[in-house]
Image: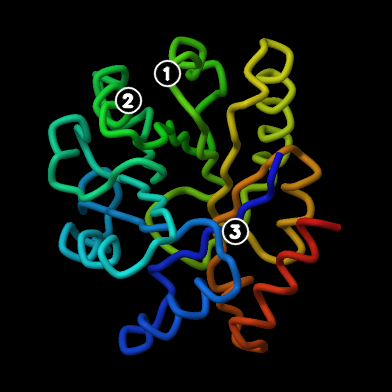
Amino acid sequence: MKQKIAPSMMCTPLFGIRECVETFERTGIDLLHLDVMDGSFVSNYTLGTNYVKELKAATRIPLDIHLMIEDPERKLDWFDFSEGDYVSVHYEATRHLHRALAAIKSRGAKAMVAINPATPISALDSVLDDIDAVLVMTVNPGFAGQKLVESTLKKIRRLRDSLDGAGYSHIEIEVDGNVSFENAGKMREAGASIYVAGSSSVFAKDGTLEENIAKMRGILEG
């Protein structure tokens, strides 16, 4: 399965977004990860609807929209996404998960379920026919810069083995939370294939974007 890098747009400098996107296009970045938080499901606010719309219009790189919001099925029309984009809704945030996933797929996007570190992989059993990928949170959602929840590495492996064993080897696993250079290698070995890259990898201060992307790609393809 192709290894994909999804830089976290939450980490881009405010006055350097255009330059970052140009670098991502030039270096063949696969997805742009957008964290959308509502202050309710998680106690933080981040990227909003206009940001998503303007970024969508500014680049051909597919978006990877991570909705950390309550009742996402009622709010999907607020966001600009289409064929080829990825959209994840949290298992813990909706009572109507199938409805949310169907609405995402009706617009041609890849439908994903995100699960928090303490949510068991069995929560996915009833939606495996409805999803293209799973977003495994490797920290508790809401803030950047957190320490990896170590048990999630075993969780990624259990999920990959479970999906493959049940005939769902096409379902991708995305990881989000302290995806450092070191941890990315461990996550790859566990079965991940999409990596939300933030301040501990692609945006690390001791390298340029180009250098960090090349280093990350080397780890994932190694």
Q: What amino acid type is highlighted by mark number 2? A: Leu
Q: Secondary structure at mark 3?
A: strand
In this orientation, which residue lies closer to the viewer: 150 or 46? 46
Kindly identify which residue carries mark 1.
130
Quarter of the image with the N terminus in it? top right
Q: CA distance from mark 2 to mark 1?
A: 7 Å
Disc 3 + disc 2, Cβ < 8 Å:
no
Q: CA distance from mark 1 to mark 3?
A: 24 Å
Q: Which mark is residue 157?
A: none
The numbered mark, 3 or 2, whose residue comes first in the sequence reads: 3
Q: Secondary structure at mark 1?
A: helix
The answer to whether residue 149 is left or right of residue 57 is right
Q: Is residue 200 above or below residue 172?
A: below
| Residue located at (21% from left, 46% from top) | 40
The numbered mark, 1 or 3, whose residue comes first in the sequence reads: 3
Q: What amino acid type is highlighted by mark number 1? A: Asp
Q: Which mark is residue 5?
A: 3
Q: What amino acid type is highlighted by mark number 3? A: Ile
Q: CA distance from mark 3 to mark 2?
A: 23 Å
How many discs appear? 3
